Image (spheres, coloured by chain):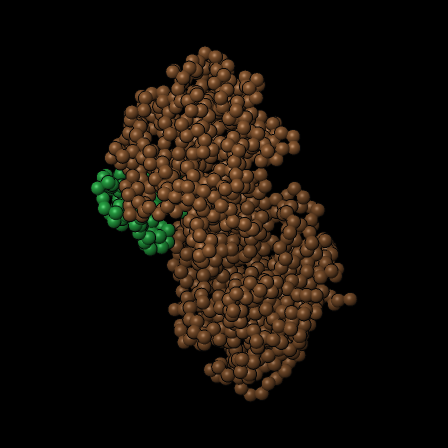
Chain colours: A green, B brown
Amino acid sequence: MFIISCPYCGEREQSEFKAGGEAHIVRPKQPTELSDDEWAEYLFMRKNIKGIQYERWNHIHGCRKWFNLVRDTSNDEIKSVYKMGEKPPSI
Amino acid sequence: MSKNLRVKTSKFIDETTRISFKFNNKTYYGFKGDTLASALLANNVHLVGRSFKYHRPRGIMTAGSEEPNAIVQINDGTALTEPNARATEIEIYEGLKASSQNCWPSVNFDIGGINNLLSPLLPAGFYYKTFMWPASFWEKYEYFIRKSAGLGKSPTKPDPDIYEHRYIHCDVLVIGAGISGIMAAKTSAKNGLKTLLIEEKPNLGGSTIYQNSDHFKINNQNSNSWLEKEINEIKKIQNLEIKTRTSVAAFHGYNFLLARENLTDHLPVEQRKEKTRHKLLKIRAKKVISATGSIERPMIFDNNDRPGILLSSAIKRYTDFFGVACGEKIILLTNNDSAYETAISLIQKGINIEAIIDNREEVDSKLIYEVEKNNIKIFKGYTVIDTSGYKKINKVSIMKLSKDGQKVVGSKINLSCDCLGLSGGWTPAVHLFTQSGGKLKFRDVDQVFIPNVYPSDQLSIGACNGDLTLDEILSNTSNSLKKFLNIKNTEYENLEVVSSTNKFKRNIWLLPSNKILGKTKSFVDYQNDATAKDIKLALREGFRSIEHVKRYTTTGMGTDQGKLGNMHALGIISETAGAKMGELGTTTFRPPYTPLTFGTIVGRNVGEYFDTFRKTPIHDWHEKHNAEFENVGQWKRAWFYPIENENMHDAVQRESKAARESAGILDASTLGKIDIQGTDASEFLNRVYTNAWSKLAIGKCRYGLMLNEDGMVYDDGVTTRLGENHYIMTTTTGGAANVMGKLEDYLQTEWPELDVYLTSVTDHFATVSVCGPNSKKIVSEVIPDLDFSDESFPHMSFMNAKIGKISCRVMRISFTGEHSYEINIQANYGKSVWEKCMEAGKNYNITPYGTETMHLLRAEKGFIIVGQDTDATMTPIDLQMDWIVSKKKYDFIGKRSLYRSDTIREDRKQLVGLLTDNPNEVLEEGAQIVANINKSPVEMLGHVTSSYYSPNLKKSIALGVVKGGKNMMGQKLIIPMEKKNINVTVADPVFLDKENKRLNA
């Protein structure tokens, strides 16, 4: 079980959080103008990396804020945590 | 009368407290401090169980948690019974009853023993190979295989014991209280760190605490006396918590560990009452120090599994710690110096050693010289090739090893004995280290895996780090601790140490024999009866990965998880396949290190505490009025209210009729309620619902359907506009929390520019819903000041009102198709409003109805229930609810998905009404729907989602999803049931009041 440092509350147990999948997938501003393939790319396609992965997490049993973190999925090391809207750190 | 093999008073055993216990229904005596194993050995009982596959007689092999053979059922026939308990860990108590497992009719005469004679027919993979054909026979085979499988018997009665969970946070956790663990705990605590020391045995000190010999000295004291003083000192340290009888089960990432603290298993049953049996400790440690020691290796040769064959270190522990002799004519087989430590202990206690068989030739060792001084015969360069004795060993055969150790040479010598000790060197206990994600390296010189790369802030010290002699332990532990704890010095830097062990070992994984391998039974995994022959067979058959060999031969898959034999399996694989040990890797060590009971895992979360449940403010009233409840999410909802001997059907029919004919009342408090405010609230609703919201007037209500981005229906409910920038949304009971989460997600991550605030107010309001032709009369009596005329208060609108001084919100909305009102009031007034409505409705036969009637009424009206009539594959179009999907809105969640190539298919499953040809026949929910029963395979067109007998329409009605159902109106379909086929006709899903006359009446 990880310890996650919520950018609003500080270090908390993983059980207080909910994982929200891959980060930085932006909802298209004009979905109706996309082809089926382009829409499917947004809707379904997710990476599943062994290594450095950018993820969305929600402090659901705490401040309920969404934020992003960078995790090495091979050893669960959390490299960085940052707020929604902030630029992703390069790792 | 059994023999007494208690040889000497031990200070670890309280000989003034005699304890009686039963083993296989026979009474024996032991002393306080004995384990079941030590007490049985003191009574000269070696045969305790039968092996899993061949049913071979097996005895006590070890003195610890690594025991593969001596696993027993305790307290059989009682609620306290437990299978697969290790005799080497059970502390005896007055009244303990233990029995052998895996044998019938008894451990002395076991019918299954015939498998031993059949063993040439039962090679590795026997079951896989034999029971393959024909495939249809598997069900028959399985019955017999299951009968003969499994070890102990699971308890059948509810567990009477109490279990708890406890969270512990500490600076330093030390696992294992042997000499290095004691040093670590003391150093850590004395440097001001909050320290927790955990030990699986009842006492501290590991094996050093009984290492009483001139050959092992620290500062001129025998190592045991030195350690005893250290232990006495650490017991006084304030910030050091010590837990014995506590076993670490799992070591997860981020230094999160689970341990089981055993609090009562050593007490007589009558002293356990009201006490917690086990505590599951959930430990989060800043730093972890593993001092888990090492496990002695057995040796692999023909018939190496007979009762009376033990690890040499176990013989030493039984002698020194328990004062018990494991035999009267002991032979030791070794490839290293540790067997001589055992020999010296036996000599000290006056136990007869017949001979020592050492794989090594001449070795310069003080320990050997001391043993030789006592005129004990040592066969140097020899090995054991076979043993005899069915229920107990009585003879070993030995031969000289060739120079390369690959063959035996010369002639066979037979030696009689009643006990054989094996010392194949030591395996560092790295299980927890690797569980945590640590990487091992292989040390060639003595063929051991030791920790290499640490995945978290942790350290391994002592024997589990590969420091296997006293001098190495003391110097390396001190140095490692300084670095790890970032301290300048320890108390252990200038110790004078005497350590006489010669470290040379002659490692031969599979000892050679004068027979061909196929004729031998050289056990690698004792519990699962996997032999060296099986492993070689697996390799011949093409298995290469150790993980595959493990599963094919079942090596290491018993309750002991291969703590003894796994290294030999690896060694044999590497030798046979010509691969290097270090490159071969190891199988994965998985938690738990030793088995946990289910009780420990669930803790207090049993019975009514299994899950939390939620009650509405009106719950007591429902209870008092005989309601049956159903679980909806975590809520307890009134299901129906039987009067006298009514069954569910009768109650629901009565409630449904009353609601349509006069008045019904429902507790709708469980519906999710989300308060939405902000200047962009209307825009937000436009984006999350499929229909348009901007033009909804203040004071009006609107039904909304919410989709997922994939276009599938997610939730529904009525939302009311309370003010210019203020709405109250209702959600389904089960979906409330998820809807809230989803809305927050979009607001925070996709549309942070919107000025919208969400508050969950589900629990803040109680909701009383009154419906039926007389609902207006009743509600207007409860709220006399309000104008209930259709002009000022039409269907789908809302009014603020007061009941006495208490404000409430009244919505005229309906889920039943009847004229109805929902009164929302501060939760603590819910029950009183309910009672007021009941009082006002007395003259109108107001009838409380539950969820079942609610479902029936809405089905008559063709209203869907999300999650019952939909299943995350249904779009609004599939539900024939095109009318709710705005064509004008540029975007809303899920809009783009509604015209993907897959969602516009005409042959998707679509919601339809179903009427049975026989109006009295009620369909089963979930039943399959087909068109042609004669063409095989029969095509499944869909299934029934809702089905009821409607007392108002006096016929059976149902909703279902059918492929292409939209265009099947009037078509005949078939519902095939077990005993008959039911004919149905596809109908409009709205069965009652299509014109909405009742709603607007």
At x 65%, y 30%, the residue is B644
User: Which residue of the protein is positioned furthest toward the top in this rendering?
Assistant: B785
Residue B851 visible at all: no
User: Where is B756 relative to B295, above or below?
Assistant: above
User: Which residue of the protein is positioned furthest toward the left in this rendering?
Assistant: A33
User: Which residue is more in the foreground, B439 or B535?
Assistant: B535
Q: Which image quadrant is residue B970 in?
A: top left
At x 52%, y 39%, the residue is B919
At x 57%, y 18%, the residue is B842
Q: Which image quadrant is residue B17 in?
A: bottom right
User: Where is B217 relative to B953, above or below?
Assistant: below
Give the x, y percent position of residue B74: 66, 56
User: Which residue is more in the foreground, B815 or B318?
Assistant: B815
User: Where is B409 relative to B221, above or below?
Assistant: below
User: Which residue is more in the foreground, B835 or B527?
Assistant: B835
Q: Is residue A53 left or right of residue B339?
A: left
